[in-house]
Amino acid sequence: MTARLFLRAYVPLALLGCASLLGVVPLLAPALATLRLRPEFASLPDAGLYAVLLAQPAILLLVLTALGLALADKAGLRSLVADAARGRPLQPAPARATGRLAAMTVVAAVLVLVVDAALARAYPHAFASVPPASAVPPLARLGALLYGAVAEELMLRLGVMTVLVALGRRLFAAAFARNPGLVVWPAIAASAVLFGVLHLPALAGVAPLTAPLVVRTIMLNAALGLLFGFAYWRYALEYAMFSHALVHVVFGVAGAVTAGAAPTLLGP
């Protein structure tokens, strides 16, 4: 891929990702207050403090998006946005396949809610400090949807998963040629587990990191990450984003219907 073609694909994805980072701004109030206590940041306006807080994830997103895009062809993975930007023929999934993915996503999200409720009943003391979904303002919920569906998919699926698939394809070329799933599924699983682990800092910000909460957060987010990774592999990156966003919608509806019983730290 020439530098010009790379940039034509990279720029829209990078801009989309950076815009989605703004979705977490409504969630950063506690971190903003903590940062202001440090003398070197005490005189900065709120806009400057937000820039400090968003700088690290923005850099990580830009780097992982670049790596994933550079290796996507070698990994046999694709993005519709990148294909369109480079003038390639678009190959969206058939409507029936998209419908199946939507149904799978809804079922997976509901199962996660059921398991989460069962774990809360089994370990009530561990879950006592976790705020209900009703405690999250609508604007913050919408921001989490945008951040999760776009930024996290760019970093975890386009970035981490693509790198792992490309590396596995190079190291195990014969196995990949015989059955791509032998290489792709471990990459999907590894990126899904990392997806779950990366939710722990948010959990630590609102509740003590007890063993049941840690296992629950990693396990349930990783389960959803398997679905997002499958959607990326089977269709395109944008279908992983669609599935991720739909999980948030299901959680939001469940939270409204059950007066906040839906989880607040799953799949953001």
Image (cartoon, rainbow, N blue to C red):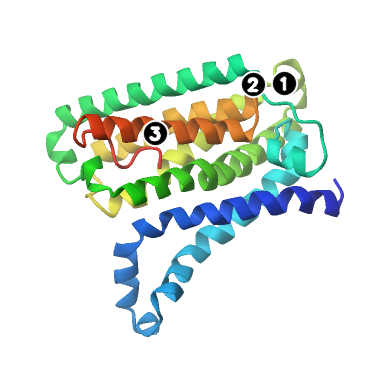
Dot 3 alpha-carbon crowd within 10 angstroms: few under 14, some 14 to 19, many 20 or more: some
Mark closer to the chain start, 2 or 3 = 2
Rendered image: mark on residue 249:
3
Residue, disc 2: 182
Dot 1 alpha-carbon crowd within 10 angstroms: few under 14, some 14 to 19, many 20 or more: some
Q: Residue furthest right?
A: 2
One can see residue 60 in this view: yes
Residue, disc 1: 175
Tell me which residue sits at (34%, 26%) in the image.
Answer: 112
- Are the residues flagged by discs 2 and 3 in contact, CB closer than 8 Å? no
Q: Amino acid at mark 3?
A: Val
Q: Amino acid at mark 1?
A: Ala
Rendered image: mark on residue 89:
none
Q: Secondary structure at mark 2?
A: helix
- Are the residues flagged by discs 2 and 1 in contact, CB closer than 8 Å? yes
Q: Quadrant of the C terminus?
A: top left
Please indicate whether residue 121 sits to the left or right of residue 184 in the image. left
Mark closer to the chain start, 1 or 3 = 1
Mark closer to the chain start, 2 or 1 = 1
What whole-number distance in Å separates the C-alpha atoms at marks 2 and 3? 32 Å
Q: Amino acid at mark 2?
A: Leu
